[in-house]
């Protein structure tokens, strides 16, 4: 897990790599302030003989053009259903979806001019055809003449290290390469909004890291609005600037990745004590902090917690002193998105709502 | 939205797939030819008493050709949709700004052209084998073929659409091919209502053109109209069922499932 490394790299989006294939936002209709607006989206699946399933529950979301957003949530949270509702592959039960100014339900063919997706990775391409043939086909499916788009498409294949294998049937390529072909086939459609649903699913660690690097470069250099949906926090933390956490069809958190990490970084502590604490002191400690955990490691005791506010730390230290234990070490926990995510997903999410109200959604 | 580019892409893909599956295509050609040869020589050997009174063995060649075209057309539509759903690309096809209907029509037209070429080769082989040199008047033939086979595409759409919603239905795909034989062989002259069956009237008219050399405009207008209405009718019915099934699939989120 890349703890903190993404923040270290810096998010200097003005630094555009000169050899990254340029996606042109030529058509004026592409440059719409809001790439995507979802209002009160609800999707209920009815099944014969079984109770209905609410996959998406009155969801509201706005994405600005150029944002790189992660949809994070466990399997079955509704991420894919949301994406498919936007694309028109699933009919919503209720709600309004606007893609680059077009109503996704009433003006579907217009809306679909502006959005593309990788949905099931390598299953979204034709294995009997070569990468070049696939790219050419999907670009054409979107109405792009290959001759006009050729330059950009060839550059894309270069960028994704597929140039050597461009004329080899996809069937013969490695899993990672197949996945890359699927991604460039979506990019080849040259839409201003792109969805990547579980782009690293099924890939081994090395291939996943490689693809993540490419996606990171893409996010940094391409001017499109990109939505990455995953249950893998590493991918989101690596690639996205903003993350929307989905649970049971609802948004439970929506903030910049940095902010989510910052909340926990400044206030997550780990303390190793020389001794245990009496039950009374332990109880009081537990009441003063959040996300309290206490374990014994041999003679020592270790406790981790999050402070509701920074000055509470003095109170904690005081409690330990009264309890007669010595502080062997005290350190700030370096959280990663997984911890933040897990904590949010658990029912104790209520405690975090205060920080989210305080932090406005930075643009 | 340039629909012509979309069509070209799909046509190119169809050609590529044909080339990649060329072995399958050739073996299919051989199989169909062998079946014809057996059928023909058996029919001649037993002194063929034609189902259609007064018709000769030449009618058999025409009937076989029509059956082949119908079968290819039906298979294309029924299987293609299921196949795309199975491999996972169906959703991507749905994402074309030209619309899913246009994508299917482009596919239909592309495959039709290939099937015509395939049938042309078969026809040549059949004529060589049988010794019957039929009248190949393309101006009369092509429109009639289109009218006749439209019904078959309609069936293909119906089965393809139903397969989107009810996955099990694929096991009954094959049966319809044999029902086509019944349609073609049905005695038109004996039972007037037969002309409302798919393929029946079309086959009859094609026989007039290919065996007796009658030109398109010399055919009875009433018959032509019947063939047109039957063909268009089943085609539109198929399209309607397909559209409805796609809607249900979208409601239930079935497009991506197999």
Image (spheres, coloured by chain):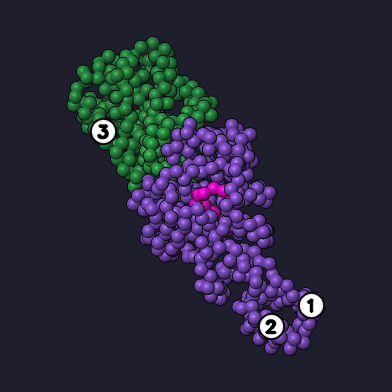
Chain colours: A purple, B green
Query: Which residue lies under the disc numbered 1?
Result: A328
Which numbered dot is residue A314? 2
Q: Residue under circle 3?
A: B230
Q: Are marks 2 and 1 on the same chain?
A: yes
Figure quadrant of residue B183 = top left
User: Which quarter of the figure has residue B160?
Assistant: top left
Tell me the distance, in whole angstroms, between the alpha carbons under discs 2 and 3. 88 Å
Which mark sits nearer the N-terminus, 2 or 1? 2
Label 3: which secondary element = helix
Residue at image location 27% in from the left, 23% down from the top: B204
Vertical order, A13 against A271 (above or below): above
- What residue is at 76 percent from the left and 82 percent from the top? A276
Asked if residue A195 is positioned above or below residue B147 in the image, the reply reads below
> How far from the left and from the top, in percent, is residue B217?
22, 19
Q: Nearer the viewer, mark 2 or mark 3?
A: 2
Query: What's the chain of the residue with tag 2?
Result: A
Label 1 packing within 10 angstroms: few (<14), some (14-19), many (20+):
few
How many neighbours does mark 3 have within 10 angstroms: few (below 14), some (14-19), or many (20 or more)? many
Give the extent of the magenta segment: A220-231
């Amino acid at each position: 897990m890349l703890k903190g490394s993404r923040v270290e790299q810096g998010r200097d989006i003005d630094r555009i790599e000169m050899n990254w294939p340029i996606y042109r936002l030529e058509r004026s209709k592409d440059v719409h302030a809001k790439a995507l607006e979802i209002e009160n989206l609800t999707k209920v699946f009815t099944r014969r003989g079984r109770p209905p399933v609410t996959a998406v529950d009155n969801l509201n979301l706005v994405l600005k053009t150029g944002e790189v957003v992660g949809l994070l949530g466990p399997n079955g949270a509704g991420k894919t259903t949301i994406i498919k509702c936007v694309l028109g592959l699933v009919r919503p039960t209720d709600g309004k979806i606007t893609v680059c100014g077009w109503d996704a339900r009433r003006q579907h063919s217009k809306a679909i001019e502006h959005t593309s997706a990788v949905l099931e990775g390598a299953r979204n391409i034709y294995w009997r055809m070569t990468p070049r043939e696939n790219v050419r086909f999907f670009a054409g499916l979107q109405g792009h003449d290959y001759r006009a788009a050729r330059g950009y498409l060839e550059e894309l294949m270069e960028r994704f290290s597929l140039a050597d294998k461009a004329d080899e049937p996809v069937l013969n390529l490695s899993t990672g390469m197949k996945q890359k072909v699927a991604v460039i086939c979506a990019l080849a459609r040259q839409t201003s909004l792109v969805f990547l649903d579980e782009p690293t699913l099924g890939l081994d660690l090395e291939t996943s890291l490689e693809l993540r690097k490419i996606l990171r470069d893409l996010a940094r250099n391409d001017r499109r609005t990109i939505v990455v949906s995953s249950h893998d926090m590493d991918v989101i933390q690596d690639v996205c600037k903003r993350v929307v956490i989905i649970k049971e069809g609802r948004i439970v958190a929506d903030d910049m990745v940095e902010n989510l990490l910052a909340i926990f970084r400044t206030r997550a502590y780990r303390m190793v004590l020389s001794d245990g604490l009496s039950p009374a002191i332990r109880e009081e400690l537990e009441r003063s902090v959040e996300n309290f955990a206490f374990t014994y490691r041999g003679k020592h005791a270790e406790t981790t917690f999050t402070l509701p506010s920074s000055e509470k730390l003095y109170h904690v230290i005081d409690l330990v002193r009264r309890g007669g234990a010595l502080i062997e070490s005290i350190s700030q926990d370096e959280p990663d998105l997984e911890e933040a995510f897990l904590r949010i997903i658990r029912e104790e999410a209520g405690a975090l709502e205060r920080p989210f109200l305080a932090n406005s959604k930075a643009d | 939205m340039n629909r012509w580019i979309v069509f070209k892409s799909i046509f190119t893909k169809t050609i590529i797939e044909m080339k990649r599956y060329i072995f399958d295509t050739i073996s299919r050609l051989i199989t169909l030819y062998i079946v014809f040869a057996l059928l023909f020589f058996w029919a001649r050997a037993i002194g063929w008493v034609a189902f259609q009174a007064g018709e000769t063995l030449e009618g058999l060649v025409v009937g076989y050709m029509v059956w082949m075209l119908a079968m290819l057309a039906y298979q294309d539509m029924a299987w293609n949709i299921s196949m795309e759903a199975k491999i996972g690309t169906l959703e991507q096809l749905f994402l074309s700004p030209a619309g899913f209907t246009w994508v299917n029509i482009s596919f239909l037209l592309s495959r039709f052209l290939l099937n015509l070429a395939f049938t042309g080769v078969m026809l040549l082989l059949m004529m060589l084998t049988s010794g019957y040199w039929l009248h190949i008047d393309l101006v009369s033939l092509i429109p009639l073929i289109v009218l006749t086979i439209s019904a078959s595409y309609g069936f293909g759409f119906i089965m393809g659409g139903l397969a989107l919603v009810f996955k099990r239905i694929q096991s009954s795909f094959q049966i319809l091919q044999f029902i086509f034989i019944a349609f073609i062989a049905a005695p038109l002259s004996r039972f007037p209502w037969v002309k409302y069956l798919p393929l029946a009237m079309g086959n009859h008219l094609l026989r007039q053109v290919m065996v007796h050399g009658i030109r398109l405009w010399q055919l009875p207008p009433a018959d032509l109209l019947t063939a047109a209405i039957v063909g268009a009718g089943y085609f539109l019915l198929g399209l309607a069922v397909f559209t409805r099934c796609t809607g249900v699939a979208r409601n239930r989120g079935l497009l991506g499932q197999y």
